[in-house]
Image (cartoon, rainbow, N blue to C red):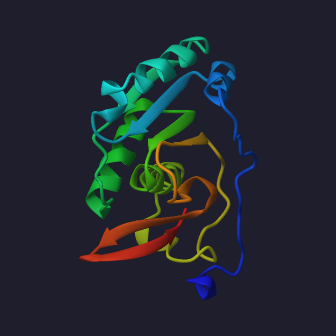
């Protein structure tokens, strides 16, 4: 995989401390899309807490939930279509590695409407585009590291394939 990534792009900011979710209050946005998995965020109250912080921004919130446990091309494009409808200027992915991988690759496809998933098989193919959205990733599991990488794993033709996002 390292041969595939001759350049490495890292996030602009990583926040690691108790209570850091309160920073969501200060997002300046008009339309925020929250991407998450199943019902656990709702059941344990975290989604409600996050939405409450985001209310301070007075942005329109769109929930894109039930993201696939293993992102597939089909499930990624479903999220992209929902992002297009929402016209999000902030995308917040909350969950495990699959949710964050989906959020990352969906953001790039959302911002590159003429691109196809296969275009992201190498970061040499990824061109700079006009950034229309910001990305915030909030991990709910330890260990995947998806929140600090620029790659996403998507099931394509029955195989897990890494993509640069």
Which quadrant would residue 25 be assigned to in this image?
Answer: top right
Measured as percent of width and height from the top left, residue 87 is found at 47, 32
Q: Residue at 61% of width from left, 73% of height from top?
A: 123
Q: Is residue 133 visible?
A: no
Q: Is residue 32 visible?
A: yes
Measured as percent of width and height from the top left, residue 53 is found at 56, 17
Q: Nearer the viewer, residue 108 or 152?
A: 152
Quadrant location of the C terminus in the rendered image:
bottom right
Q: Residue at 47% of width from left, 48% of height from top?
A: 141
Q: How many marks?
A: 0
Is residue 78 shown left or right of residue 54? left
Measured as percent of width and height from the top left, residue 26 is found at 69, 20
Measured as percent of width and height from the top left, residue 77 is found at 33, 53
Is residue 118 shown left or right of residue 124? left
Q: Nearer the viewer, residue 66 or 110?
A: 66
Is residue 72 shown left or right of residue 98? left
Q: Nearer the viewer, residue 106 or 113?
A: 106
Q: Residue furthest right?
A: 12
Q: Residue at 61% of width from left, 15% of height from top?
A: 57
């Amino acid at each position: 995989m390292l041969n595939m990534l001759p350049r490495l792009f890292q996030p602009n900011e990583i926040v690691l401390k108790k209570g850091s979710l309160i920073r969501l209050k200060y997002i300046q946005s008009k339309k925020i899309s929250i991407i998450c998995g199943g019902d656990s965020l709702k059941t344990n109250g975290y989604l409600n807490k996050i939405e409450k912080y985001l209310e301070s921004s007075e942005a329109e919130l769109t929930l894109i939930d039930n993201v696939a446990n293993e992102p597939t091309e089909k499930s990624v494009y479903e999220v992209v279509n929902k992002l297009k409808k929402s016209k999000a200027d902030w995308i917040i992915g909350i969950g495990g590695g699959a949710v964050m991988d989906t959020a990352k690759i969906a953001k790039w496809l959302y911002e590159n409407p003429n691109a196809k998933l296969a275009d992201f098989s190498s970061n040499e193919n990824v061109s700079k585009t006009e950034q229309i959205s910001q990305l915030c990733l909030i991990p709910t599991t330890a260990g995947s590291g998806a929140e600090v990488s620029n790659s996403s794993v998507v099931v394509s033709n029955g195989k897990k394939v890494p993509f640069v996002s």
